[in-house]
Amino acid sequence: MTLLHLFLVAVIQGVTEFLPISSSGHLILLPGLTGMEDQGQIIDVAVHVGTLGAVVLYFWRDVGTALIGFGHLAAGRRDTGAARLALGLTIATIPVVLLGLALNLSGLDTAMRSVAVIGWTMLGFGLVLYWADHKGASRLAAADWSVRHALIMGLWQAVALIPGTSRSGITITGARLLGYDRSEAARLSMLMSIPTIMASGLLLGAEVITTADAAAAQDGAIAAVMAFFAALAALAIMMRLLRSVSYTPYVIYRVILGVILLVVAYS
C-alpha cells in the first residue's frame, strides 16, 4: 500500500473511532467512493491497535482503576468503586462479543457493508443521538454506573455492529437516555471501547496472523502509529469541546453525509 493510502486509513480510523460518526462506515466508504483498493484485515487490525493505545493512554487513570477492580473481583470483593467499574466493563462487552461472533460466523457482517445501509444508519442513528442528547437528563456521573446500566449500554453497543451506526455514538446515546451528562457519557463510552476493540482486534488478528508477511507487517506498524496520534488528538479535542458544546455538530455531519449516501445509493 502507498503511504498516502495508509495515512488516509489511519486518520479516518483514528479520528472517527471515538467521534460519534462511525469509523467502520467511513472505512467501508473509502474504497467504495474513491476507487482505492480495500485496505484488508491486516491494516484493520493495525489501526485498531493504534486507537486502542490512544484511549488507554488518554484514560490511563480509569484504566488503572479498572485493573485494580479486576483484582478485587478475583478476590471476591464487589463493594469497591474499582470493582464496580471492572464488572461494568465486563458486562457491557458481553453482548457485542456474542453478536459479533454470530454475525462473523453467519457472514452477515459482510452482507451489511453497503452504501445504502451506511446511509440509513448514519442518518437514523444521528437523529436518535440528537433526540437523546436533548431529552436526556444530566444528573449522573461515571461513579453512578451500575450493573443494570452497564448491561443496557452493552446492548446499545451491540447495535453498532451495523455499519454506519457508530459504537461511540450509540453508547453515548444510551448513556444520555440513562441520565449521564455529556462528558461522563463520552467517558463511559470510551472506556467501553477498550475491551471491545481488544476483542475485535483478537478476532481479526486470529484470522490474518497466518497470512501476514514482512511488507504487510511494516505497513501495519506505520498505520498503527498514525492511527494512535490521530485518535489521541480526536479524543482530546472532543472531550474538551464537550464542556461547552453539545453533540449537535456531529449530528449535522451525520445527517448531511447520510442524505448524500442515500442519494448515491439509490440514484
Image: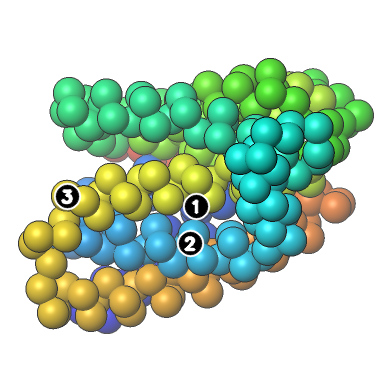
Front residue (pair 143, 226): 143
Q: Is residue 186 left or right of residue 245?
A: left
Q: CA distance from mark 3 to mark 1?
A: 22 Å
* Type of amino acid under label 3: Glu
Question: What is the C-alpha distance between the residues marked 2 and 3?
Answer: 20 Å
* Res 234 → quadrant: bottom right
- Mark 3 / mark 1, whichever is N-terminal: 1
Q: Position of residue 7 (x, y in %)?
A: 35, 74
The amino acid beneath tag 2 is: Thr
Q: Position of residue 104 (x, y in %)?
A: 22, 32
- Residue 263 is labelled as none
Residue in the picture at 22% in, 61% down:
42
Q: Residue 52 location, x and y as percent?
A: 49, 59
Viewer-proximal residue among 111 and 134 = 111
Q: Is residue 251 above or below residue 238?
A: above
Q: Which residue is label 2 attached to?
A: 51
User: Marks 2 and 3: CB-CB under 8 Å?
Assistant: no
Q: Earlier in the sequence, mark 2 or mark 1?
A: 1
CA separation in Å, label 2 and label 1: 7 Å
Please state if 117 lies on the left or on the right of 66 as rendered. left
Residue shown at 28%/30% (left/top)? Answer: 101
Relative to residue 213, is residue 18 depicted above or below?
above
Q: Secondary structure at mark 2?
A: helix
Which label number is shown at residue 207? Answer: 3
Which residue is identified by label 1? 17
Instruction: Specify the amino acid type for callout 1.
Output: Glu
| Mark 3 or mark 1, whichever is nearer to me | 3
